[in-house]
Image: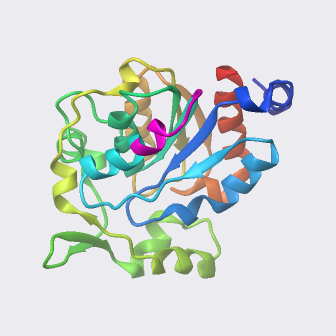
Amino acid sequence: MSISRAAGRIAATEKNRLPRVILVHDAWFDGSSWNEAMSRLQAHGLDVLAVSNPLQSLAGDVAVVRRVLDALSGPVILVGHGWGGTVITQAASTGNVAALVYVAGLAPDRGESVRSLRACDPELAQRPRTRADEAGYIHFERTGFSYYLAHDLPLIQANVLAAVDAPIHRDALEEVIDQPAWRELPAWYVVTTQDRIVLPASQHRMATRMHAEVREIGASHVPFLSRPREFTEVILEAVARAC
C-alpha cells in the first residue's frame, strides 16, 4: 500500500476509531529516541505513546506495556525496536493489539530467550564490546555507539543518544517467552539493511519465521531517526490495514 493510500484511509477514518500506536524502545535507548517518529505520526492524526522500559527484566518491561494496553480501548499497533521486539512478543498476547511492527527487532519463539536466540544464530551472537557493572547491568561502550548503532546519523546526534546510557540487566536476556504474539497476530518487520548490531540476515530469518510482511530500509539500527519518512510509511501502512 502506498503512503498516499495509507494516509488517505487514515484521514477517512473517524479519529476515535483509529488504532493507537505504542512505541517500545530498545536497550541502551529511552522513549525520547522516538521523538521524530512521534511528531510525524501525530501529524497524520494518530494517537501515539512511547513507553519507558525499566530494562531490569523482561517481565517488568512487559508489565509496563500491558498497563498501557489495559488503560486503552480500541485497537493498538505495537512497535518494538531491538529488545523492544522481545517485549512486544510477550506483551501482546493479551489485550487489544491489532498488529505488531518489529524494527530490527528480536523476536524469540515459545521457550526461547534472547540469549538462546543468539546462541542459535551465529550472526546474532556476534556483538560489540559491552561491559557489565557490579549490579549486572550491561552498558554499551560509548566509543562504539555511533559505529554500531547510529553510523548514519551526524556524530553529534549519535553522541547525544549514547549519553542516555540506559543499560539492560543481563538476567533479562535469560527470561523465556511463553506466549509469542507473532504466532497469532499480523506482523510487519522493518529490516534495516545497514544494521551493524542486528545484522540484516538475522533480521530476515526472524521475519521469515514469523511470516511477517517485510519492508527494507537502507539505514542503521535507528531508521526512525536516520530515515524517518520511510519508517513512518511502514507504520502508516500497518495502521491503515487495521482501520
Colour basis? rainbow
Name the residue: 82% across, 32% down: 7
Q: Residue at x 72, y 38 (%)?
A: 233
Q: Position of residue 51 (x, y in %)?
A: 49, 54
Q: Residue at x 42, y 56 (%)?
A: 26
Position of 46 relative to 138 (above/below): above
Q: Is residue 5 above or below residue 156?
A: above
The extreme left residue here reads 134
Q: Position of residue 142 (x, y in %)?
A: 40, 80
Compared to 147, does 214 lie above or below? Answer: above
Residue 74 located left or right of residue 5? left
Say if residue 62 shows up in the picture.
yes
Quadrant in which residue 98 is drawn: top right
The magenta segment: 67-75
* Residue 160 image-quadrant placement: bottom right
Q: Residue 96 at x, y = what percent?
A: 49, 26
Which quarter shows the N terminus?
Answer: top right
Asked whether residue 132 is drawn in magenta, I would say: no
**Is residue 105 something that shows in the picture?**
no
Residue 79 point in image, percent of width and height:
52, 41
Residues 42 and 209: in front is 42
Task: Tell me if 75 is positioned left or right of 140 in this view.
Answer: right
At x 25% / y 61%, what residue is drawn?
A: 56
* Of 37 and 216, the residue lying toward us: 37
Question: Number of callouts in the render?
Answer: 0
Image quarter (top left, top right, bottom left or bottom right) of the C terminus: top right
Q: Nearer the viewer, residue 230 or 101?
A: 101
